Image (cartoon, rainbow, N blue to C red):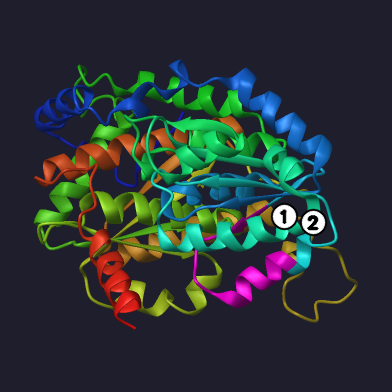
Amino acid sequence: MAMIKFLTDEDFAIDIGAAKRMLAEIKTDPMSGWLNVWETVESDKIQSYAKSVQENSDFLVCIGIGGSYLGHRAIIEALGNKSKTKVLYAGNSLSDFELNNIISTIKNHDFSLNVISKSGTTFEPAIAFRILKKLMLEKYGPEETARRIFVTTDSSSGVLRKEAERNGYTSLEIPDSVGGRYSVLSNVGLLPLAVAGLNIKELLEGARVESENIDASEDLSVNKNSAAALRYAVIRTILAQNTFDVEVLATFEPRLRYFTEWWKQLFGESEGKNEQGIFPAATVYSTDLHSLGQYLQEGRRNIFETFICFDKNSGGLSVPEFSDDFDGLKYLEGRSLSEISKKAETATIEAHRSGAIPVFEVVAPDLSEKSLGALIYFFELACAISAKLQGVNPFDQPGVERYKENMSYLLKKS
């Protein structure tokens, strides 16, 4: 269960009424299928597809961009690829260098493709799919290629749906009620996660349990863990109204680097419209303390920080003993690296608070499937409510289409 932990002894008297009204509106929105996505996921079918990929392929190349890849990549990067079949990613840029690296990796191995796109016409994944499909046809021929392509797309329309039906590709549906950046715990993310050997049922259970923590009927100044996602949404909105218009998501765990990328897309696309929104940024400490640390400590005071913290996080390494004190660190001998990292985290939070940065923590028990499922649900819910509190639609992204229109025009013109 995710939990908000405020680094102050004062009680927060928060009017949660507005957030409760926003939550009620979200529940009736046609794009709210992610609120109870575990009720519609076909886990057994996904596991069956994943098993066939694992039996036949050394690599699964996931082709997608934005919400079609960031979420499941974040989880795999955080927890590790535990299967002999390794998940790779293509179609999230227009770099031929990156795509050539993928081709070099897979060309002498057996591989499958999972192309993830609602429309099938987004430039980056569509081009990558063309190139990798051609490679696959040359390697396997049309019949075997059809068995090795898995399409995750719209339930009834779009070019990918038509191609899947025409060529007999195995397909999964992107729910009509789930937008891309809220889709990681749907069919969009679960097939790659299952192929990577991760426990998708535990991910969904973590989200389901977190959903039970949204009852805001209690006095929040007494029980600070009640309705944590609602509290987070309200407080960040209050901060934005008081000139804190940049939020930094911070972590001391490098494995969460892609999780912060997923988080940036979630909040950036959901809130950044109508000249509204808190700018989402991210840091991975302690590395970034040696680059951005000075700015965070003494730069402009328009920033607040949200730390992702874990109660348990140990890899078993400790500082070894030496007979002399050549580096002045003898007092650390025998202490675990995780303990030292935790002290660094506490020291950083205290230092930034002393520099007048509002800081609070989102605390999870450990770094596991269940905890990540809870964190994903926590941020999705908080994001949707936060956007509504700022008067914008959490589920559209009209500005993203502008570059696509310009790009199409320039390419056709040339």
Q: Residue at x 39, y 79 (%)?
A: 294
Q: Residue at x 35, y 33 (%)?
A: 178
Q: Tell me, yes or no, whether the two marked residues, 2 and 1, touch with CB atoms within 8 Å.
A: yes
Left or right: 90, with 213 as reference point: right
Tell me the amino acid under the disc marked 2.
Answer: Lys
Q: Residues within 10 Å of mark 1 (few under 14, many from 20)?
A: many
Question: Between 245 and 359, which is closer to the camera in this rendering?
Answer: 245
Residue named by callout 1: 136
| Residue 62 pos. (x, y %) | 60, 50
Q: Which residues are magenta?
A: 88-103
**Splitting the image into 4 quarters, where does residue 199 fall?**
top right
Magenta span has 402?
Answer: no
* As drawn, 15 above or below 251: above
Question: Between 123 and 2, which is closer to the camera in this rendering?
Answer: 123
Q: Which mark is residue 139?
A: 2
| Residue 71 pos. (x, y %) | 49, 46
Q: Residue at x 31, y 29 (%)?
A: 177
